């Protein structure tokens, strides 16, 4: 992996981004002579987020970056020494200083996979002391990434396949790392682009954006562009004074719209002209700074039509207040009548973008049939995951020294499944999801067409299933995004419902169920 990715991994998650009790347990393992005992942990969640039926697995590439660069520096070890008992054996700190993850094995769901309760997102094996130290940073890297990817996937399901979704939540995110994570994994979950420049630089997320009201209000109308001349898009022909051309077009547009020439705001007009001179091939207008109908729309049309005479095409408009659905309808109507009036058919299809605290309910309204909205910008509702702030992932020990370990507890929901396991996704003949099967790693893998006797989790009796096919289990971010959308397409309508969805089955093999029953009855191995 490129050096800058490793550097990013160090900056985002360092070894001491952990809980203090990981260090105290490490010392306990050391004093007990168990630091090098082979162990395996599983990282999973217990309930699907947002009341839905699925999650998307995400954060794997960040985990790999972290593990590849994991190394306690001298300053890290010195700090731990200041926090632990003063009589701690110096050999313990020497051991910490020598740690790396070359002896750690990670098995994981592919990035962008559908994930379900109890099925491991990560299975981490290696020396007991070391894989214990990895618990908190791995949870930190996986939990929020998977939560925001799932949230983005829900928003994509609501929007449908044709609306373009723009993530613009950096300013609302929980800190810089949260902002970068949200931009990265909202893209994986189905968004088309992000306003986050760093996500574009570091992660290759497609960038998009418009302009802010501050740009428009900064102009009074008295400004004179240093060079108002613009050459035709084809590069041939004389340069044209864009300011003068816009003024002529504004007269024609106002007459067509039945507006007085004094109604469009002069500062807004100057701002649009300045933006068009800077971006003639990517001109777009923010329409609601003063008045959409009486100012923003006529000013945009005048500049767009002046550019059109030179062979350029405006790329869109944005609405950021008011009834977005209704305003988009009106803007599209004006585009169509103006296109007919001035015989410029391209104007009819200029994309309309909207933003302004859009949540699931408003998104469903904007995505309804007949909506003229093309691009939907969402910030707070995607990056903060307001319906559920945490996925609740856990990292549990399942094996030490080759022997299964199980947490019983007073709460049956918090019991763990013992032993090193393999997970298989079983599909029906039509490619739809049938169930996930957990079995002990030593068991032979299931085969397509083979009848299996399994125990659905929580069931008192086994059942038989016959899968038609099995899913094959680190692609690039864009490939993971495509994989996530393909995975979501396998959900049945009942599972895809965002409210009161059907429950997806996760089942245990008979051998794993027998081991659970044995350990639950007190049979320690």
Image: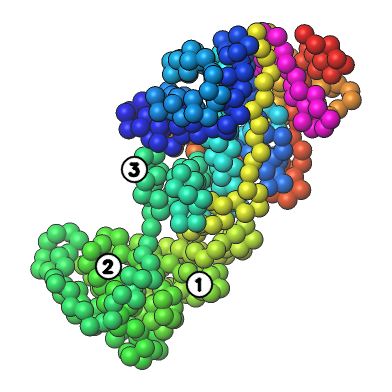
Q: Is 470 left or right of 181, judged from the image as shown?
A: right
Residue 162 against residue 403 in the figure, above or below: below
Magenta highlight range? 402-424
Secondary structure under the numbered disc 1 in the rendered image? loop
The local crowd at label 1, few if under 14, some if 14 to 19, many if 20 or more residues have their Cα within 10 Å, is some
Q: Considering only order in the chain, which callout, 1 or 3, is on the residue closer to the N terminus?
A: 3
Residue 298 at x, y = what percent? 36, 79
Most foreground residue, 86 or 313: 86
Q: Read off the residue under disc 1.
A: 321
Q: Which residue was labeled with disc 3?
A: 201
Sooner in the amino-acid sequence: mark 2 or mark 3: 3
In the rendered image, residue 47, in percent from the top left (x then y), is placed at 72, 38
Position of 448 relative to 498 (above/below):
above
Query: Looking at the image, is 520 positioned above or below residue 496?
Result: above
- What is the number of the mark on residue 275? 2
Nearer the observer, 283 or 395: 395
In the rendered image, which quarter contains the C terminus? top right
């Amino acid at each position: 992996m490129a050096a800058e990715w490793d550097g990013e991994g160090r900056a985002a998650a360092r070894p001491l981004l952990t809980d203090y009790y990981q260090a105290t347990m490490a010392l306990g393992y050391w004093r007990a002579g168990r630091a090098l005992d082979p162990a395996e942990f599983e990282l999973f969640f217990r309930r699907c987020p947002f009341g839905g039926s699925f999650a998307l697995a995400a954060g794997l590439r960040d985990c790999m970056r972290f593990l590849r660069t994991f190394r306690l520096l001298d300053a890290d070890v010195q700090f731990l020494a200041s926090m632990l008992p003063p009589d701690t054996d110096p050999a313990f700190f020497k051991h910490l200083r020598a740690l790396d993850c070359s002896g750690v094995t990670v098995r994981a769901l592919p990035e962008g996979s559908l994930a379900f309760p109890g099925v491991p997102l990560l299975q981490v094996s290696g020396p007991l002391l070391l894989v214990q130290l990895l618990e908190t940073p791995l949870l930190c890297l996986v939990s929020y990434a998977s939560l925001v990817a799932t949230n983005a996937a829900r928003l994509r399901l609501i929007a449908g396949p044709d609306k373009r979704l723009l993530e613009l939540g950096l300013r609302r995110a929980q800190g810089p790392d949260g902002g970068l994570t949200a931009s990265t994994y909202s893209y994986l979950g189905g968004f088309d682009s992000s306003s986050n420049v760093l996500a574009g630089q570091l992660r290759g997320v497609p960038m998009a954006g418009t302009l802010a009201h501050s740009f428009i209000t900064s102009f009074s109308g008295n400004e004179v562009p240093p060079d108002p001349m613009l050459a035709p898009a084809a590069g041939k022909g004389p340069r044209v004074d864009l300011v003068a051309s816009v003024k002529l077009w504004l007269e024609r547009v106002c007459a067509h719209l039945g507006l007085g020439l004094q109604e469009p705001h002069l500062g807004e007009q100057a701002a649009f002209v300045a933006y068009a001179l800077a971006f003639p091939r990517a001109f777009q207008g923010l329409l609601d700074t003063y008045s959409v109908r009486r100012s923003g729309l006529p000013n945009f049309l005048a500049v767009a039509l002046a550019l059109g005479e030179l062979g350029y095409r405006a790329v869109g408009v944005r609405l950021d207040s008011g009834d977005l659905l209704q305003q988009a309808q009106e803007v599209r109507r004006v585009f169509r009548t103006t296109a007919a009036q001035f015989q410029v058919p391209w104007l009819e299809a200029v994309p309309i973008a909207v933003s302004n605290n859009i949540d699931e309910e408003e998104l469903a309204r904007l995505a309804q049939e007949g909506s003229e909205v093309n691009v939907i910008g969402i910030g707070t509702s995607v990056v903060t995951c307001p319906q559920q702030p945490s996925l609740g992932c856990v990292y549990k020990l399942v094996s030490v020294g080759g022997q299964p370990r199980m947490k019983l507890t007073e709460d049956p929901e918090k019991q763990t499944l013992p032993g090193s396991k393999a997970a298989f996704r079983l599909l029906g003949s039509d490619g739809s999801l049938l169930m996930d099967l957990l079995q002990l790693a030593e068991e032979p893998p299931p085969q397509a067409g083979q009848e299996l006797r399994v125990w659905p989790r929580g069931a008192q009796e086994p059942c038989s299933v016959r899968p038609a096919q099995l899913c094959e289990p680190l692609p690039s971010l864009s490939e993971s995004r495509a994989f996530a959308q393909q995975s979501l397409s396998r959900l049945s309508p009942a599972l895809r419902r965002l409210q009161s969805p059907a429950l997806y089955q996760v089942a245990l093999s008979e051998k794993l169920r027998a081991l659970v029953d044995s350990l639950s009855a007190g049979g320690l191995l």
